Image (cartoon, rainbow, N blue to C red):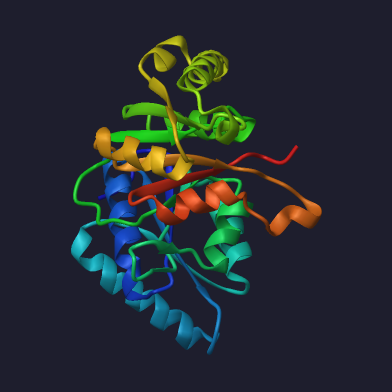
Amino acid sequence: MSATSDQTIFLTTDLTARGDRPMDRAIQLSKARGAKLVVFHVLEKGRHDSAAVDAAKAEIELDLASYDIEADILIERGDVVSEIIDNATTSNAAMIVTGVARIGRLGDLVMGTQLERIIHHSPLPVLIAKNRATTQYERLVAASDFSTPSAHAIEQGHKLFPKLQAHIINAFHVPFEGFLHSETATEEFRTEQHLLIMKFMEDLKLSSEARSNMTYSVEYGDTCSVVQQALKNRHSDLAVIGTHGTSGFRANMMGSMARALITYLPCDILAVRQPPK
């Protein structure tokens, strides 16, 4: 199958067994969009000669053989994160598709340093494929704290998946709730948060039609639990979150909430980094 679009899906693989899920999803996205598929691997350890390159390429070709799809295969040497980001950017990719480091015994994602660095430094959205791609995405939930990074993530999520049903969710706590013990205070704060999310929706850089087709809500509770319940209630298979882009001392740090959501949500994650100012 040849690409009929200038979109590019950039799949990065470490050639381990856990790479089947991102490969499934990248191929499905490429076929559905008529997009070019690039499969990328970095020779990080061991031999870096031409024989090693040929062996890695042959392994990828074997994995692709049953999919009936054409793909560009790129093999590079060097630092995994910088090579992935540089080559994805050069390829003019719409997104980077990657997998997880591993899944813990309780089902949570163990991110790994390289995955966290990719998410935090990539100027492109990063799709983390946790599940097998048995169907196309149908619904997404986007977590919002009304910040600029979360707005940017929602805008980019809509750009990449404009046909998906989208729901924006905000989780809130009542300040000093341990001292107040008041349902009235909770409802007053809920009303305030509702007004904030309405304003947030109005300010999104989306068409009026796009905004009108999105639903939104505010829910009391911790963010991870609220977002996970929203995914379950709406049968959503994709979560969209924003991460902060920084430089200097904080360049290798990701927000704790973004990390928690990426770690514990059970669905695929589209992580979008806010461009540094």
Please say whether residue 3 is visible from this viewpoint: yes
Asked which quadrant contains residue 107, the reply is: bottom left
Residue 72, relative to residue 207: is it above or below?
below
**143 left or right of 137 in image:** right
Give 216 or 273, whichever is nearer the viewer.
Answer: 216
Give 4 or 258, whichever is nearer the viewer.
Answer: 258
> Total label count?
0
Please name the residue shown 39% across and 12% down the image: 212
Give 183 or 223, whichever is nearer the viewer.
Answer: 183
Q: Quadrant of the C terminus?
A: top right
Find residue 102 and report its horizontal and vertical position in percent. Answer: 40, 69
Asked which quadrant contains residue 200, the reply is: top right
Give 262 or 209, whichever is nearer the viewer.
Answer: 262
Find residue 25 and report its horizontal and vertical position in percent. Answer: 31, 53
Looking at this rendering, what residue extends furthest in the right direction? Answer: 248
Please name the residue shown 41% across and 78% down the image: 56
Please say whether residue 90 is visible from this viewpoint: no
Residue 47, relative to residue 244: is it above or below?
below
Please name the residue shown 33% across and 45% down the image: 3
Find residue 217 and report its horizontal and vertical position in percent. Answer: 41, 23
Find residue 49 and report its horizontal and vertical position in percent. Answer: 54, 87
**248 left or right of 263 in image:** right
**74 left or right of 113 in image:** left
